[in-house]
Image (cartoon, rainbow, N blue to C red):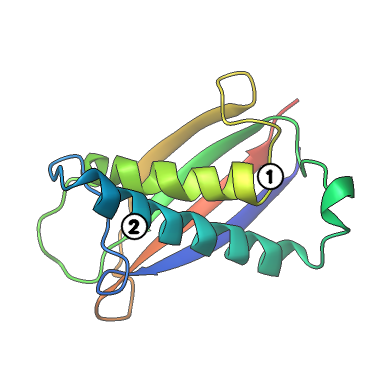
Amino acid sequence: MTARVLVVVVDVHRAHLLSANHRGHWSVRRSVSRVLRDTAALELRRAIGPVSPPSAVRPWMTRAHVLVEVAWPTRRRRDVANVAPTVKALVDGLVTDGHLLPDDDDAHLIGPDLRSAPHLSGTPGMTRFTFRIEEQP
């Protein structure tokens, strides 16, 4: 089984985190989701390397378990489950836009399992999402 680590850093001032507690207007959520998806797909392409022509793009893995560790910018009290909509948008970017898996349904994706990191992100205003992607048989 192959395991990969992918880090996606989100600037909370540029692309607000989507939260389970905040229900903004659908058009705002959609635009934030698009920025998050594009960011995740770009980071995946950087990590994996050049991609062949789009017509020949195939998923990198057929099935995977994803563990997501969230490193916050401050020591404020947090509830990691609240960023599930943000993680969903990032996973959509990895799977749909980045072609990591054939689909993000239960047959291909186990998780994502969310955890808080024991350390800070290291950069003010930035939240770091570390994806541990382990290929499954």
Closer to us: 9 or 85: 85
- For label 1, the residue is 100
- Disc on res. 112: none
Outermost bottom residue: 123
Front-lying residue, 79 or 51: 51
Sequence-first disc among 1 and 2: 2
The structure residue drawn at horizontal position 26% and vertical position 62%, both measured from the top left corner, is: 16
Q: Quadrant of residue 77?
A: bottom left
The quadrant in which residue 75 appears is bottom left
- Left or right, 110 with reference to 56: left
**Which mark is drawn over residue 32?**
2
Compared across the picture, whether 98 is left or right of 106 comes to: right
Q: Vertical placement of 22 versus 112: above or below?
A: below
Quarter of the rendering occupied by the N terminus:
top right
Q: Is residue 106 above or below residue 52?
A: above
Quarter where residue 70 is shown: bottom left
Q: Where is residue 73? Give x, y as percent.
A: 24, 71
Three-letter code, disc 2 = Val
Point out residue 134 in the picture as x, y percentages from the top left corner: 64, 40
Q: Residues within 10 Å of mark 1 (few under 14, many from 20)?
A: many
